Amino acid sequence: MTAGTGRDEDATRPEEDPPHPADKIYADGPETGEIAVSEDEIRAEAERLADEKGDAVSAEASGGASHEADGEASSEASGGASGEASGDSSSEESGDSSSGAPDPSEAAEPDDVIRQPEDIAPDTEEDESGEARRVGAEGETAPIEGGEERPHPKLALVYNPIKVDADALRGQVERLAAEAGWQEPLFYETTVDDLGDDVTRQALEVGVDAVLVAGGDGTVRAVSEAMSGSGVPLTIVPSGTGNLLARNLLLPLDDPEAMIRATFDGDKVGVDIGFAAIRRPTGETEEHAFVVMGGMGLDAAMIANTNPQLKKSVGWVAYVDGAARSLPGAKPFRIMYQIGGHRLHSTRVQSVLFANCGSLPAGLELIPEASVTDGTMDVVLFQPKGPLGWILVWRRVAWDNSFLRKFRAGRQVLALRTKDNAVRYVRGAEVEVGATEAQYIQLDGDEFGEAVNVRARVVPGGLEIAVPKGHDVTAL
């Protein structure tokens, strides 16, 4: 982990981290009252940001059509895929700026095929029936049978073969789908190169009516990224040890059949999904989803330093190993951050979290007031001052949030306690964090390399989740 050179400010010691110019302009973090806006206001802003992002994606996708309608000027503005495929020279040779459609015979050699970047391998080959295919018991693909008897609807199961008993799960899904009168399921396995997002998009392209995901938190994150905004319900079949989204949705963790049945006869609930645009030290930017929480700094370094084999064996407990490797050299680093609609701030932190959920394994409540359905994002700044500061952080998370807040007497104790800034909470629809030096980034427990800037936002109701019939969603 690369980190800044900051140390705790102490008048009795020489300053190793001289005052930053921003300190003269910006406060060292906002007070709670300063950003005490209503959840309705935050949700409205989040929906506006989501609409803007959706409009931008739609405009990019429809570049070809708008080119035909608006002519040459529109083509320059959209930069659509048709322009990229034909090239500037092809457009000039045609001499017809109003059509914008390249001549295939001129755009490719006789034996070549014109392909777009988003092209994927076809699901069927010549002389096949044209039905979508599924993975067989030995991993081979085979045409679906029984489609005429049960033509509609159909589902897809995306699973991590390392996290589940593949044969048992596939058999269970097939049996329950047949009982519900659904078409034979499509099965997709994740791989090292495809965490689940690509195969989920393939499933959506063939028109599935529901998607089930079985795997760790990383698999759920990747599948959710592809599912966002699709309107197709997602069923989480808890697998592995984390299951953080399932925990925060209060879903049964030890009854996979109940969750599979929820696909056919359960209720649906719209939950929020977050997106983080990550800017690398090279200037490149990429955006990924998160359904639980992401972070910059020490928490991400702990994940980066966790032994992968140990994580496979004992799950989230393995992060203790990463903490032991990261804490000795941990130092605060300087950030500039801004909650959407509010002023910029400068401070030093050990870690910044942007969260969609607040509950962790072992009954720990990192953010007691966080909700996966409130349309807002919770931001947590860890600012411990030395070893005592870490004790205050642990007390806040493990004692105050996870125990005292559950009782009236405990809440009274918290109201009388002297305030400390070891952990600070803020809320908003969007947050942008910039670091003076590159820091590790994590999303839902998976390392995403280093970044110098992160812009995180929440999309209210961006995912539709299937839950068991009558499942109590009032506590979400």
Image: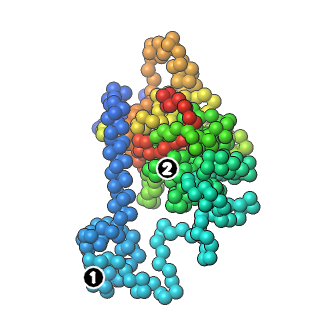
Gap in angstroms between the C-alphas marked 1 and 2: 41 Å
| Residue in view at x 25 percent, y 70 percent | 70
Camera-nearest label, 1 or 2: 2
Label 1 packing within 10 angstroms: few (<14), some (14-19), many (20+) = few
Q: What residue type is labelled 2?
A: Val
* Relative depth, front residue between 409 and 447: 409
Residue 169 on image: x %, y % = 70, 48
Q: Residue at x 41, y 47 (%)?
A: 455
295 in relation to 283, above or below: above
Disc 2: CA contacts within 10 A as few (<14), some (14-19) or many (>=20): some
**Near-viewer residue (419 or 180):** 180
Vertical position of residue 317 compared to residue 284: above or below = above
- x%, y% of residue 111? 52, 86
Residue extending furthest toward the front: 149
SS assignment at label 1: loop
Q: What element carries label 2?
A: loop
Say if residue 178 shows up in the picture.
yes
Residue at (32% x, 31% y) in the render: 37
Question: What is the quadrant of residue 41 in the picture?
Answer: top left
The residue indicated by pointer 2 is 232
Foreground residue, 195 or 186?
186
Residue 441 appears at what percent x and percent y?
52, 47
Q: Give the left or right position of residue 70, taking residue 35 as reference.
A: left
Q: Relative to residue 260, is residue 348 drawn left or right?
A: left
Q: Determine which residue is flagged by label 1.
A: 96
Q: Where is residue 469 in the image (x, y as percent from the top left)?
A: 56, 35
Residue at the (74%, 52%) spot, across then down: 167
Say the numbered circle drawn on residue 83: none
Closer to us: 260 or 183? 183
